[in-house]
Image (cartoon, rainbow, N blue to C red):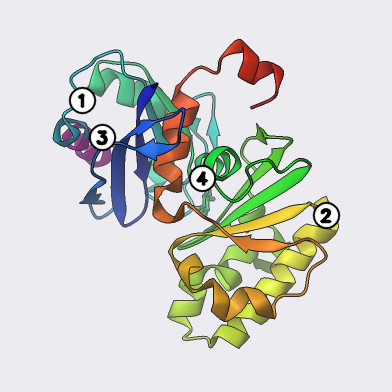
Amino acid sequence: MTLAVGIDIGGTGIKGGIVDVDSGERISDRIKISTPSGGEPDAIVDCVLDLITQLGVDDDRMPVGVCFPAIVLHGRTMSAANVSKRWIGLNAEKLFEKALGRDIHFVNDADAAGVAEARYGAAQHEDGLVIMTTLGTGIGSALIHNGVLVPNAELGHLEIDGYDAESRAANSARENEKLSWAEWAERLQRFYSHVEFLFSPDLFIVGGGVSKYYEEFLPLLKLRAPIVPAELRNNAGILGAAALAVRPTAEQQAHGR
Ligand code: BGC
């Protein structure tokens, strides 16, 4: 059993758990803390410290993976679509490592969710190109080819019909504009058919809290590739961040997993 801590930082909540990365099972409670308003770096670091204490992690060597809603390039956060602009250009991985006194692995939230679905969820045993999308405050995306992540795809920020795609098609747009499922599905159709034209994926996965209502909107979409709900729901970020924090074995690397 290989254990790692997974932490998923979002605009409203910071969630964490201890994960057996061999099986993809969470072996601790899932702990959730509200994201401090403003989403400033120092306040979020404090919450993560608190969360690790609450999880009772006593082994300093247990790998810790943290996922976050921004482009993450070599540990540095390069964007901040729905969090404080102070994250832009920050060496977030170093900031957390200093505060926690241990190594961590810092990744984009949708990439973590995509890796989790590929290893333990809806895209297990799926070859070819899988596009994971998360529909929440923004639209997150992950490209996974034959089980290998191509990091930092930001498909939610494609410009479609003159708009940043997520401003029209994220779940927050549905809520804020009080769209019916059918009205929202029209916008999703525009988004997913454009992405399908650009990438020709073999499978789309749809995550984010709203994916539990997938029966209301996924059947309305007409695409060539199958489009299925995520299986790991709100655990995907935790599981993926934990999995990515553990160095893959030589055998996993050889198989691209
Ligand atoms: C951000 C992405 C993030 C997604 C989901 C987007 O606004 O640009 O980096 O993955 O929201 O949180």
> Which residues are drawn in magenta?
42-51
| Label 2 neighbour load within 10 Å: few <14, some 14-19, many 20+ | few
Q: Which residue is mark 2?
A: 198
Q: Is residue 40 something one can see in this rendering? A: no
Answer above or below: position of 175 versus 119.
below
Number of marks in the image? 4
Picture coordinates of residue 27 (x, y %)? Answer: 29, 36
Report which quarter residue 234 is drawn in: bottom left
Identified by mark 2, the residue type is Leu
- The kind of secondary structure element at disc 1 is loop
Q: Residue at x 62, y 56 (%)?
A: 205
Answer above or below: position of 183 versus 145.
below
Q: Is residue 35 magenta?
A: no
Question: Closer to the N terminus: mark 2 or mark 1?
Answer: 1
Q: Is residue 229 left or right of residue 125?
A: left
Question: Closer to the N terminus: mark 3 or mark 2?
Answer: 3
Q: Which mark is residue 57?
A: 1
Q: Which residue is mark 3?
A: 45
Identified by mark 4, the residue type is Ala
Q: Is residue 222 something one can see in this rendering? A: yes
Identified by mark 1, the residue type is Val
Picture coordinates of residue 31 (x, y %)? Answer: 23, 45
- Which of labels 4 and 3 is toward the front? 4
Quadrant location, the C terminus? top right
